[in-house]
Image (spheres, rainbow, N blue to C red):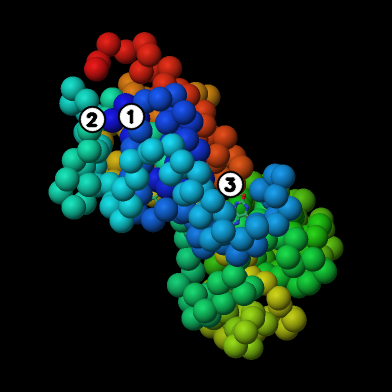
Amino acid sequence: AYDVLVVGGGPAGAAAAIYAARKGIRTGLVAERFGGQVMDTVGIENFISVPYTEGPKLAASLEQHVKEYGVDIITGQRAANLAHNQLLDLELQSGATLKSRSIVLATGARWRQLGVPGEEEYKTRGVAYCPHCDGPFFKGKQVAVIGGGNSGIEAAIDLAGIVQHVTVLEFADTLRADEVLVRKARSMDNIDIITNAQTTEILGDGNKVNGLQYTDRVSGESKQLQLQLAGVFVQIGLVPNTEFLKDSEVELNRIGEITIDERGATNLPGVYAAGDATTVPYKQIVISMGAGATAALGAFDYLIRSSVS
Ligand code: FAD
């Protein structure tokens, strides 16, 4: 059995594995794909002390750093359930079970996709999901934000300070964001809001995004944004990768995020969690790394106080 078993190989999982292994305890890391969302990222400009890097490069460094500590790395495996017996049993989709005295859950999240033509094709070439990450790449340009909930309106306000113009498209007839955000967005003269708009296609020139097509749900008419669009930020939800915990006793919030305290502890003894899969309010690489370190230290504290061997 492991002392600490980390589930997930993104920034949170890598940091947790390094912090655990540096305590000289048996550490394992199981992940479907090492690197996590970082593998889908092109330019990264907010990884503090590194002014610019690229996703695959950062992911390779994460893996190399973890490997320096003799962590038992198992990739290409999906966790399917977490059971609590004498030890913690992580059941894999392959049918195997990994046993550990403590667990750090760091399975991250994925952005909900629109599922319209052009989205996949222009991903990282105008189609973006993270305003904190990609906003500055669109400085002085015109962008659209799809989604009028809190994240969409926050994104619009954030982007309006950087880009030339923002158009928000909301499917429903009203915005679903908090009133204070809506008021702020409406007060900014470079934000336009279109409701009853169902985005049907993201248009491009074969190389990058240059427009957007939507259906006006009141008239049924198909329309095109009359702008020189450079970017489309899709803000229709971030989905935590926690489906495998639905039959476990780990407490999740309304949207499936793992509830943790300031030490990364979940409601179950010995089970810790970190990163985008949790209730942490901001989802970023540096934040996930700090959370991974916290969860590993939390797990270590638990181990030195527990009698299970
Ligand atoms: P993830 O990176 O999501 O990693 C999750 C890990 O868990 C992966 O290894 C995955 O394979 C594994 N996993 C998931 N489910 C299972 C399962 N059932 N069994 C086993 N393994 C599983 N942040 C920034 O700070 N700066 C940026 O510039 C930036 N740009 C971004 C651009 C894009 C396109 C995206 C999508 C995100 C960006 N982010 C950026 C956000 C950042 O990538 C995330 O906050 C960060 O990767 C979260 O780390 P994590 O370790 O919690 O999860």
Q: How far apart are marks 1 and 2 (CA)?
A: 8 Å
Q: Is residue 291 visible?
A: yes
Label annotation for residue 26: 1
Residue at the spot 55% in from the left edge and 39% down from the top edge: 289
Chain-order first, disc 3 or disc 2: 2
Q: Which residue is nearer to you in this view: 188 or 164?
A: 164
What is the secondary structure assignment of the residue under circle 1? loop
**Is ligand 1 within 8 Å of the beta carbon of the residue shown at mark 1?**
no
Circle 3 or circle 2, nearest the eye:
2
Give the answer, above or below, for where 227 lies relative to 306.
below
Residue positioned most to the bottom? 205
Residue 108 position (above or below residue 291) = below
Kindly state the secondary structure of the residue where label 2 is placed. loop
Quadrant location of the C terminus in the rendered image: top left
Q: Is there any visible trace of residue 276 in the rendered image? A: no
Q: Which amino acid does label 1 sit on?
A: Arg
Q: Tell me the residue that label 3 is attached to.
A: 285
Density class for disc 3 (Cα within 10 Å; few <14, some 14-19, many ≥20) is: many
Along the line of sight, the residue nearer the viewer: 240 or 181: 240
Q: Say whether marks 1 and 3 touch (CB < 8 Å).
A: no
Task: Pinpoint residue 82: horizontal percent, then vertical percent.
Answer: 25, 37
Residue 64 image label: none
Say which label, 1 or 2, has the lower sequence index: 2
Q: Which residue appears at 53% of the width and 61% of the height?
A: 56
Q: What residue type is labelled 2?
A: Ala
Image: 79 above or below 302: below
The answer to whether marks 1 and 2 mark residues whose Cβ atoms lie closer than 8 Å is yes
The span from disc 1 to disc 3 (Cα, nearest Å) is: 25 Å
Residue at label 2? 1
Residue 36 position, x and y percent, is 46, 54
- 1 or 3: mark nearer the eye: 1
Vertically, is 254 above or below 39? Answer: above
